[in-house]
Amino acid sequence: MTKPLCGIDEAGRGSLAGSLVIAGVILDTEVEGLMDSKVLSKKRREALFEVLIEQVRHRIVRFSCEEVDDLGISECLRRGLQEIQRFFGDEVEYLYDGNTTFGVPNLATMVKADAKVPEVSAASILAKVTRDREIITLAEQYPEYGFERHKGYGTQAHIEAIIAHGRCPIHRRSFRIKAIDEPTLF
């Protein structure tokens, strides 16, 4: 008998603000319409999120911006992957979207797995919707940054808002922004 597959993906890895969310999913039942969360409409992602939360085994791990600053993004990813493995146990195969295991044993990787493997697509959806919901709620506290539009990623509008208003409490202080943090010759 083959072991079940746990697909793992994260959201918020390269964001300048907000948390890092890592999700692991085992599909015990087929879920129609799974694909990489980035290519789904918001409405479709939200609908699939509700189905996944109700129907599949999953674990969602979150690291705050403070934890990302204190531990570093790689250490947060390592700890999140380990937490998912502890949750599901040894009788599961693990596949992470990407090309590195962050030193975590018994973990296979695949670039673009979120577009190729349903379990990873499901994890992608859970991670993205969890993080998007969180940052949209935080956008109400910090309206001058436009988090509801860029979700904390380094868009030109976001960088301009940081230049105008400085960093707020949900910004990652350890993430350098070239336009702000790099000295110029003039």
Image (tube, grey):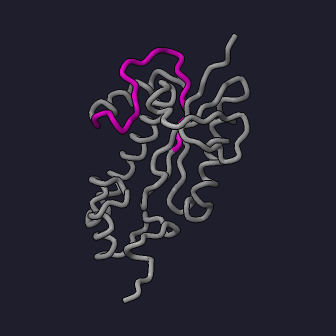
Q: What x and y, as percent, mark residue 74?
A: 61, 54
Residue 3 sits above or below residue 15 on the image:
above
Task: Name the quarter where the N terminus is drawn.
Answer: top right
Q: Nearer the viewer, residue 153 or 113?
A: 113
Asked which quadrant contains residue 47, the reply is top left
* Residue 60 shows up from this direction: no
Q: Is residue 76 left or right of residue 45?
A: right
Q: Residue furthest top?
A: 1
| Residue located at (47% from left, 70% from top) | 176
Residue 54 sits above or below residue 68 on the image:
above
| Residue located at (55% from left, 43% from top) | 61
| Residue located at (31% from left, 64% from top) | 158
Task: Name the quarter where the C terminus is drawn.
Answer: bottom left
Q: What x and y, as percent, mark residue 145?
A: 29, 64
| Residue located at (41% from left, 41% from top) | 128
Q: What x and y, as percent, mark residue 6?
A: 59, 28
* Residue 26 shows up from this direction: yes
Q: Nearer the viewer, residue 37 or 23?
A: 37
Asked which quadrant contains residue 85, the reply is top right
Q: Which residues are magenta?
A: 22-42
- Is 134 colored magenta in this rendering? no
